[in-house]
Image (tube, grey):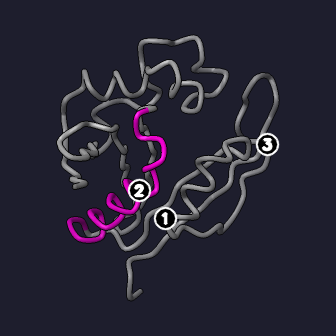
C-alpha cells in the first residue's frame, strides 16, 4: 500500500538527495561538488515522503510557483525503481486532494530520459522547453517543461 505523508525528517531527505546513485540526476555542474547538501534548501519546500508497505522509498519536493500552481521535484531512492510511476501518480493525487494546486509542473533536463518517461506516464504533458539552460558534464542541455492540471479543469 502506497502512502504519501508530509515530512520534516531532514536526515532522510538529505539521505535521499545525496544517495550516490540518485544525486547525479539531481544536480548540475555547479552543484556536483557539494556532496553533502541537496541543491534545494529544506525549508523552501513542502516535502512529501513515499511509503510503500511502510518502507520509505524517497521524497518529492513541492514548491509554490504561483498561488494555484506548484513545481515538483522527484527524489526517489534506487529501491523505488520499477514503481516510480505509481509513486508519482500517488503524489499528484495527494496534491490535488490536499492542496489548492490546480496545476503541477516540473522541469526535466533533456538527458534524463527516465524522468521524462515517468512524468509522461504520470499524465504530464510537455508545454515548452527552456533551451540550453542546464549545464551537465560541461554541455548545455535543454530543459523540458511538463505539467498536469487538476482533473476536471
Report the residue marked by disc 1.
122
Would you say 127 lies left or right of 45 here?
right
For mark 3, does the 10 Å Cα neighbourhood hold few (<14), some (14 to 19), or many (20 or more) residues?
few
Q: Residue 92: give its label.
A: none
Residue 87: percent from left, percent from top: 37, 53
Residue 84: percent from left, percent from top: 45, 49
- Earlier sequence position, callout 1 versus callout 2: 2
Q: Find the distance from the CA under tag 1 to the CA under tag 2.
A: 6 Å
Q: Nearer the viewer, mark 2 or mark 3?
A: 2
Q: Find the distance from the CA under tag 2 to the CA under tag 3.
A: 26 Å
Q: Helix, strand, or loop for circle 3?
A: strand
- Earlier sequence position, callout 1 versus callout 3: 1
Report the residue marked by disc 3.
132
State the image quarter where residue 124 is shown: bottom right
Q: Residue 88: give its label.
A: 2
Look at the magenta stretch and give its main secondary structure: helix
Does the CB distance between marks 1 and 2 fall below 8 Å? yes
Residue 81: percent from left, percent from top: 47, 41
Q: Residue at x 65, y 67 (%)?
A: 126
Q: Quadrant of the C terminus?
A: bottom left
Would you say 39 lies left or right of 141 here?
left
Amino acid at each position: 500500500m502506497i502512502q504519501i505523508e508530509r515530512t520534516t525528517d531532514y536526515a532522510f531527505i538529505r539521505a535521499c538527495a545525496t544517495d550516490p546513485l540518485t544525486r547525479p540526476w539531481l544536480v548540475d555542474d555547479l552543484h556536483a561538488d557539494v556532496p553533502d547538501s541537496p541543491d534545494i534548501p529544506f525549508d523552501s519546500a513542502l516535502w512529501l515522503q513515499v511509503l510503500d508497505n511502510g518502507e520509505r522509498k524517497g521524497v518529492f519536493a513541492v514548491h509554490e510557483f504561483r498561488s494555484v500552481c506548484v513545481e515538483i521535484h522527484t527524489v526517489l531512492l534506487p529501491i523505488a525503481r520499477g514503481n516510480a510511476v505509481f509513486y508519482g501518480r500517488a503524489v499528484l493525487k495527494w496534491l490535488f486532494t490536499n492542496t489548492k494546486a490546480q496545476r503541477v509542473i516540473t522541469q526535466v533536463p533533456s538527458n534524463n530520459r527516465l524522468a521524462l518517461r515517468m512524468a509522461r506516464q504520470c499524465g504530464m504533458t510537455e508545454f515548452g522547453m527552456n533551451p540550453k539552460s542546464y549545464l551537465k558534464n560541461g554541455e548545455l542541455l535543454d530543459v523540458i517543461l511538463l505539467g498536469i492540471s487538476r482533473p476536471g479543469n
